[in-house]
Structure formats: structure tokens, C-alpha cells
Amino acid sequence: MSVAELLDGYTYDDYCFWEGNWELIEGHPVAMAPAPMRIHQDLVTEIVYELRGSLDDECEECVVSLENDWKINQNTVLRPDVIFTCDDEGEAYLTKAPKIIIEVISPSTAKNDEKIKFKIYEEEKVLYYILVYPDDLVAKAYRLEEGRYSKIGDFSREKLKFEDLECGLSLDFDRVFKRFRKR
């Protein structure tokens, strides 16, 4: 048996005992990058702030949060940067596909975010997937249509309204990126 075969097959139970920051994709451990660059964390903060600010106060079943584990199945656990979810009763981790996932791209995560997670989120029926590029101050937004992601557009100064979601949610990218344009 090869070393690769011995490493296959990790499960959520294994994942729970690992030290450091990991994701688990189809039984394969994926080390998350060391602490992200400051702009990454600052953008995540701005995105959460903007989404939360647009959320209808009466919408008590929906939540905007960051870096929660999403246990997709026994051998796939992901930790998106930002999520918007409704009616998820999970306490230790997300149990349902979020309505929106936002990943802030860094050079070390770009391949996973643009290809591997893109496919997983599409298969798991995440309604919106948004990739944010800090170097370009642009976000690429995708919406699930007939089981496949269709690109909505590139956003830099525009507002994206999630009209098909409850709670009147929107994301104003002009406000998200505003303070970073001055650098």
C-alpha cells in the first residue's frame, strides 16, 4: 500500500482532533494558509458589516457569519470566509448549504477557491458564490441556475441585490472596497 493510499479516507471525526487550521475535502486534509494578510481580514470584516447592515431586522432565522465549519458529509468539511444561511440548527458546524458563500482570494488559496470549492459549492446547491480579489478590488459573483453557476458579473462599485432571498439582503461593493482604494 502506498503512502497516498494510507492518507486517504480521513473523516470528520479525525478532523476534530487536528491542531491548526484545516479543511477536509473528500477525505484529504488541506492545510489552510497561515494567518491571512491584513487586507484579507479587513475585507472579510467589511463584507460581514455590509451584509449584516442590509439584513432586515425582522429576519430572525437568517445569519451572516464568518469562518464556520460546514460539514458537507463525513469526509468533507469546509470553512468559507463569509456565509449567509437561514434555518440552520447546527451548533458545532453548519448542517445545510448556505444561501451565500464569499471567499476572499489569496495566492495560496486561489486554485482551491476558483476550482475545487467552486465545484463543491455548485454540487451542494449554494445559491450564490462570490470570489473577492483584494489586489484588483473586484468581486466575481455567480448564481446557481438549473444546477450550474452562471456568472452574474464583476462588481467593484456596484450593489448586488439578492432579490430572490428573504430578508432584503444586498451587498454594496463600492462601500466594501472604498477604504482600500485610498491605499
Image (cartoon, rainbow, N blue to C red):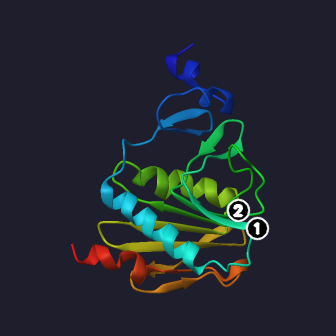
Q: Quadrant of the N terminus?
A: top right
Q: Position of residue 145 (x, y in %)?
A: 68, 74
In the picture, residue 34 is in which quadrant? top left
Q: Tell me which amino acid carries mark 1.
A: Glu
The local secondary structure at tag 1 comes to: loop
Q: Which of the numbered marks, if any, corresponds to residue 98?
A: none
Structural crowding at the residue carrying mark 1, measured as other residues with C-alpha within 10 Å and reported as few (<14), some (14–19) or many (≥20)? few
Q: Residues within 10 Å of mark 2 (few under 14, many from 20)?
A: many
Residue at x-position 76% and y-position 57%: 88
Residue 115 lies left or right of residue 86; in this view the side is left
Looking at the rendered structure, the kind of residue marked 2 is Lys
Residue visible at 73% across and 75% down in the picture: 59
Q: Can you see residue 73?
A: yes
Q: Position of residue 85 (x, y in %)?
A: 68, 63
Report the residue that reaches farthest toward the left.
183
View extreme (top): residue: 1
Mark 2 lies on residue = 125
Where's residue 47, x and y in %? 48, 70
- 29 relative to 158 in the view: left or right: right
Separation (CA) of disc 2 from disc 1: 19 Å
Q: Viewed as shown, does residue 152 lie left or right of 108?
A: right
Which residue is located at x 44 percent, y 63 percent? 44
Q: Nearer the viewer, residue 17 or 7?
A: 17
Depth check: 123 or 85 in front?
Answer: 85
In the picture shown, does residue 11 fall above or below 150?
above
Q: Write the residue at 67% across / 80% down.
A: 56
Tag on residue 61? 1
> Does residue 47 sit above or below 26 in this rendering?
below
- 79 with respect to 164 (left or right): left
Tag nearer the camera, 2 or 1: 1
Which secondary structure, mark 2? loop
